[in-house]
Image: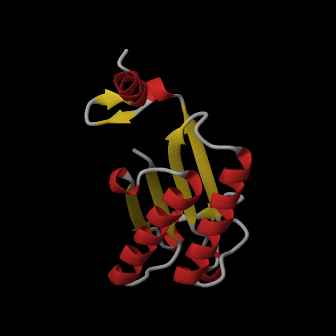
Amino acid sequence: MPFIRITLGKSIEVTQQQRLARRATELIAAILHKRAEVTAVQVITAGADAWCIAGDAIAPMLIPSHAELFITEGTNTPAEKAEMIAALHRALEESCGPLPEASYIVIHDIPAGNWGYGGLTQAARQQARLGL
């Protein structure tokens, strides 16, 4: 199950948050070939008081947004991941407007034995599909 956590630097309407979550799900399915029906997306807002750059509070117009994607290691190419980062950045800008440069998108490649859902690791799911 891919997991995407999006932290926005500014508040947007709930309907916009849901649209962003749907768009992130569409992108991870189309670009990284993940199953949309098991993709979880969390969209939260963290205002100016939750952010620092170089250890200092930042001006409201410089508040970044951030996204993390958790996928199974070895399932995507560097080119696919680069395309995903660019596409999700565009989706964030469509939702929030221009993003400060400190807005990061991180793709975590996690070994199949180190994460899972439904009480099973991804490795156990792979073995079950292969009949092992």
State the residue lying farthest toward the top: 132
Inspect this view and state whether residue 57 appears.
Answer: no
Left or right: residue 49 compared with residue 56: left
Q: Nearer the viewer, residue 10 or 131?
A: 131
- Dividing the image into 4 quarters, which one contains the C terminus? top left
Left or right: residue 108 compared with residue 54: left
Q: Nearer the viewer, residue 45 or 55?
A: 45
Give the x, y percent position of residue 101: 73, 70
Q: Based on the displayed image, in which of its 4 quarters is residue 60 positioned?
A: bottom right
At horizontal 42% and vertical 32% (from top left) the residue drawn is 115
Left or right: residue 103 compared with residue 26: right
Give the x, y percent position of residue 97: 60, 85
Q: Using the image, determine if residue 61 lies above or below residue 122.
A: below
At horizontal 57% and vertical 74% (from top left) the residue drawn is 91
Q: Using the image, determine if residue 16 lies above or below residue 29.
A: below
At horizontal 57% and vertical 52% (from top left) the residue drawn is 32
Q: Using the image, determine if residue 79 lies above or below residue 126.
A: below
Give the x, y percent position of residue 127: 39, 21
Q: Based on the displayed image, in which of its 4 quarters is residue 1 positioned?
A: top left
Q: How many marks?
A: 0
Inspect this view and state whether residue 76 appears.
Answer: yes
